[in-house]
Image (cartoon, coloured by chain):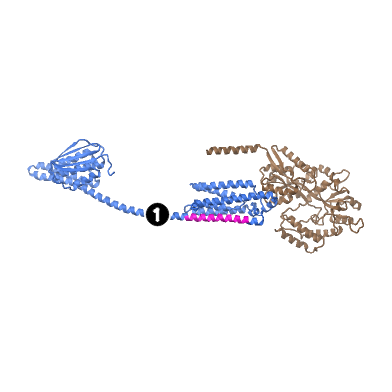
Chain colours: A blue, B brown
Amino acid sequence: MQKILTVTGMHRLLYGCNAFVVFILMAFMCLTQNRINQSMTARAFLEQAGAVPQSSTVIFCTTILAFSAFILVGHFYIKSKNRHTRYLLFAAEVVICMLLMRVLNLAYDGVVLLVAADLMYKHEGHRQEYTLLVALICLYFITNSNIAISQAKVISFEAYASYYNAETKAVILALRNTFYSINIVCFVFYLVLLVKNKHEEKERIRLLNEKLEEANQRLRAYAIEVAHMAETRERNRLAREIHDTLGHALTGIAAGLDACIITLEVAPELTKQQLNKIRDAARKGITDVRRSVKKLRPDDLERLPFQEALLEMTKDYSASSGMEITFDIFSWSDNLRQDQEDVIYRVLQESITNAKRHGQATKVKITIGGNENYLLIVIADNGRGCENVKQGFGLKHMRERLELLHGTIHYWSDEGFIVEAMIPLNREVNK
Amino acid sequence: MKKILAGILAAAIIFIVIHQMRSPVTLTIGIFAGNNWDVPQGAPYAIIDEVIKNFEAENSGVKVKYVSGIKKEDYSEWLAEQFISGEEPDVFFILADDFNLYASIGALKNLEDFIATDKNFSTEVYYPAAFKFGQYENISYALPCESTLTFMFVNKTLLAKEGVALPKNNWTWKDFLEICRKVTRDTDGDGAPDQFGCYDYSWQDAAISNGMKFFRDDGRTSYFADSRMEETIKFMIELRAVNGGGFAVSPKDFDVGRVAFRPFTFAEYRTYKPYPWRIKKYSSFEWDCIKMPAGSSGGNISVMDTLLIGMSSRTWNKDLAWALLKKFCYDKKTQQLILKKSQALPVRRDVIISAEAQEIFSWDSSETAAITPADISCAMDEAVMPFKFKNYNSAMLYADTEITKIINGVVPLNNALNKLQKEINALLQH
């Protein structure tokens, strides 16, 4: 029951209903013709019929073939995607419909409703409403004109029914009218279902739209939140950058200036040289700051291969601060990612800066080693060190940066201060 | 797979088409046994068989079949059944009563195109009343095959006994009344007349020879109030009075030779005139046929009945069917065969007036026939065709009842014909 009450189910039922009526009518005509011949009333029948009937065989075969063709064409019409093919198929359907009605002596026009049902089934969109209207009008016009034109040559159903006695005739006519009515009821019900279906679909679309709108709103809120978070993160990063670049440069300059103050009077020439170096460091710092602002990436890293960039950076620092920095590279990974490079660069920069600023160190030894799984960086200075390391901004940022790469950092005081950073290689960040 | 199927289908169609083309074409012809004129006939299919044999000889690869044994009274129903079961013959005889029905329901092929395009065919050869008989609403649906005409049968022995000369072919009602008056008398002296002027001479016969037309061709209206009808009635009243008044003339009176005139169809004339039927009937007196007596406003006109042959509108072999139709209705050989072997008259004028006809119609060299082929041809030219619209029989039956009442004096003539016309018109509207 549930299945029949769908549009497709009803459509099929309509086809079934029509097939039944067409078959019954065809059988009635064939049987009546045969009975007329057997009962020797052929001449009287011809007189009443007013046309030459087709033979039973022709009626039978034509009806069966035409209806089968109708079902086939209808099927392809509903399945077809191409609009032009569909128009062609629809035209074919109309022609078959007319042929069928002609064979049945226009005794049954329910097939027109079937054509209309097919048309409605496939109807979609707005402009098609006009097409539908025009097609329906044409359909009825064609059938009516068909009736009008071929009136003289068509045997009325009453002529067939008149072969039987009055009582039987009444029953036959009543049956035929019942079939008509059933077909019309089916058609109307089909239309109701079709309209209902369309309405439900609209409702469903409306609900979906509402949900979509809600999701959109949530997404918008989320986007704002994310933007906010990104801003915070970026602010933190900026803070780090300022600390790393500007802090580094300024510490170096401050230390260099301290030295200059001492040496100014004793060796003015040396002081001058030192001042020049400090100026260079300051310029470098400025460039660094600019770059940070612009790209937030060290220029050396941008400009030079990584290892050279590191050497350049330390050379510059030692030149400005007078600290002796040595490199011991045991092994080196050639395919470091950019973020890894960045972190290594910043860690070295920060450690050197710390060695000068906090430990007053004169010598820094940088050792880089490791294997294919990790890279180990040890920065040891000969500075004061400290008993209780208070994690300042620099250390904290180093840890944060390393942690982003799943790396670790350790620092302790021995003969000076030692920072040991370990960066795992071949690992996707945040995976 | 689809291609293979389509290929098989195409091959099958081609095979069937070739097979159809090679196999001999079979035409069927619908005929009834005997003849259309209700006169006895010896070999019912002799003419048909010969025509078919000729046709098959002329058209190789064509076979013509017919169903034998259908009587004329069953033929109408048989033909209708063939139409209903879709097996109707390609070419078939059409009874006069059926013609309008089949023409109106589109069962008969419209022959106008054939007539117009066939250079070997001309409608000129036919007598107009014969050719027009095959028309419905001025369109030819059938061709005439053979005709028969009503003549006046004359008892020559009786006229000679009464000292009356054989009337000429252009005689009139006046002559007719005169002779009737002379011959009607009581010969055995029992007080009642036992010798009569005429038998079976109907008011219809009289009206037609007075130029009367009863109905419009489409059978929608009648002309009974016509003055010629009134003349006819008056003549019939007079004739009745002359012809023994209220005494009814029986066929037996005629058979034993006590009646001078009786209308007869030409078919009857041809049947009973020559041997062997001559022995069987009307052997006690000499007789002959002349034209019908002319009315005051008409002529020596009588009704000519024609047997029509048409072809089915659903035939598959239209051209062959047309050829067969022509073979029956137009071919000179066939028409001569009809002249020679059938009781009816051929429909071709040139055959009627041929030298052969001259020979055939003078049955007995010792006796000069009162009617010559030229007279027959002339009568056929003047003849009118019977009506064949649907309600003709019922209308005519009604008119006959009423007019018989007037002639018999039951109803006064006064305004009776106007009334009759109105009533008949009302009847025709149904």
Residue count near mark 1 (Cα–Cα under 10 Å), binned few <14, some 14–19, many ≥20: few
Q: Quadrant of residue B276?
A: top right
**How many numbered badges does the structure rendering display?**
1
| Image position of A44 (left or right of B196) | left
Task: Compare residues B134 and A167 and report the one nearer the observer.
Answer: A167
Judging from the image, mark 1 belongs to the subunit labelled A
Query: What is the magenta segment's predominant secondary structure?
Result: helix
In percent of width and height, residue A85 lies at: 51, 46
Task: Compare residues B159 and B295 and report the one nearer the observer.
Answer: B159
In percent of width and height, residue B238 lies at: 84, 59
Residue at the left extreme of this rendering: A266
- Residue A183 in the magenta stretch? The answer is yes
Residue B256 visible from this viewpoint: yes
| Image position of A378 (left or right of A36) | left
Describe the element under mark 1 as helix, strand or loop: helix
| Image position of A30 (left or right of A421) | right
In percent of width and height, residue B200 lies at: 82, 54
| Quarter placement of the C terminus of chain B | bottom right
Residue A121 visible from this viewpoint: no
Check the image and report above or below for A354 versus A328.
Answer: below
| Image position of A68 (left or right of B314) | left
Q: Amino acid at mark 1?
A: Asn
Give the residue number, with chain letter if any, for mark 1.
A209
- Residue B102 in the magenta stretch? The answer is no
Boundaries of the magenta span? A171-196
Residue at the front extreme of this rendering: A1
In percent of width and height, residue B281 lies at: 85, 48
